[in-house]
Image (cartoon, rainbow, N blue to C red):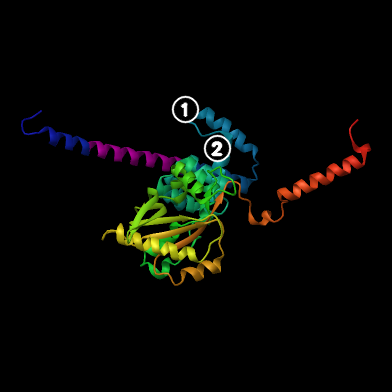
Amino acid sequence: MGSNLSPSDYDSFLRELKEQIRIAQMKAAAAVNRELVVLYWQIGKAILARQQQQGWGAKVIDKLAKDLKKEFPDMTGFSRSNLMYMRAIAEAYSDEKIVQQLVGQIPWGHNVRILEYIKDIEERLWYVQQTIEHGWSRNVLVHQMESGLYNRLGGAITNFEQVLPQPQSDLAHQLLKDPYNFSFLSLSRDVQERELEKALVDHIRDFLLELGVGFSFLGSQYPIEVSNKEYRLDLLFYHVRLHCYVVIDLKMGEFEPEFSGKMAFYVMAVDNLLKSEIDNPTIGIILCKTKDKTTVEYALQPMQKPIGVATYRLKDTLPELLQGSLPTIEQLEMELNTLSVEAIADPTDLDE
């Protein structure tokens, strides 16, 4: 090594070169993926056109799969099922510009899963964009689609528009969901608030995935002191994109108006005790089992602190339409007792 090149200078130079190489590798991989997806789309478009113009049936795909694999034995992806997906993606996205600019930015396997799960074109492209933005793995993408993320985002009731400046109010509102999906928990229906809180902390990775990108967990039963009296926040987070603290309060029942007043107090305390000059205003989120839209809107209207109210869904929670139609445990026991009495009264119905 030359006398003019110090070890620290060389190490810095090597790090820069490594970073440039990694970036080039990523760009090359992305370019290869985009070309592959475009190729598959073009094959699918050609198959679709021949079937529509010349009336070719589904058997042509079987023949193509056999002949293409014979001609290109070192290439994977020419199975019958994959050719069917190529045809499907060409049918789903008629504009090659969309394929080049969006669909081609994510792996083929991701695109196949989106085709399988989602039928609406707008919703499909939304999941494509979210995958690009957040770098979702295939498993995370499937989880988000199965949980209906598209229809849950932005569904919470908030007062953000009235108390937060733009564009923070829009961004904050879009980050909230309704309902939150806690199906990764195995809890009984009569679970208490502290049990729910502990279960969420025990499954913090799943909880953070459900909350969405940007949430950083700071603690549960987080202590704050106001006028020599200690209060504890159920859950405290910091959101790195909103640059603000987020307080979450868990409630096991229906939303009550007094919940918003308590949350406003917590948000005010965090603003005064934890928030720095570079942080944006703290946000409060109240998670309830159920809520009435009008009650929530009335409760939030006079609040000067940003608060959102959403519901959550546990694994064993039934849709509202079914809850009233299924028999209760007491009704089932009564029915069984009636059947037992009828069986004894008519011995001819008993097995010999």
Residue found 25% across the figure and 36% down from its top: 18
* Extreme-left residue of the structure: 3
Going by the numbered disc 1, the residue's amino acid type is: Asp
Instruction: Give the distance between the C-alpha atoms of the residues marked 1 and 2, in whole angstroms.
Output: 16 Å
Q: Secondary structure at mark 2?
A: helix
Q: Nearer the viewer, residue 34 or 124?
A: 124
Magenta span includes 21: yes
Q: Secondary structure at mark 1?
A: loop
Question: Percent from the top left, x then y, of residue 204?
Answer: 44, 44
Q: Mark 1 vs mark 2: which is more N-terminal?
A: 1
Going by the numbered disc 2, the residue's amino acid type is: Asn
* Extreme-right residue of the structure: 348
Residue 74, disc: 1
* Extreme-front residue of the structure: 228
Residue 82, disc: 2
Question: Percent from the top left, x then y, of residue 137?
Answer: 45, 41
Does any portion of residue 99 appear in the rendered image? no
Residue found 56% across the figure and 38% down from its top: 83
Quarter placement of the C terminus: top right
Q: Which residues are magenta?
A: 17-37
Can you tell which quarter of the image residue 166 is in? bottom left
Question: Percent from the top left, x then y, of residue 145?
Answer: 53, 48
Magenta segment, principal secondary structure?
helix
Can you tell which quarter of the image residue 188 is in? top right
Magenta span includes 103: no
Q: Is residue 242 above or below residue 257?
A: above
Question: Percent from the top left, x then y, of residue 314?
Answer: 56, 48
Does any portion of residue 100 appear in the rendered image? yes
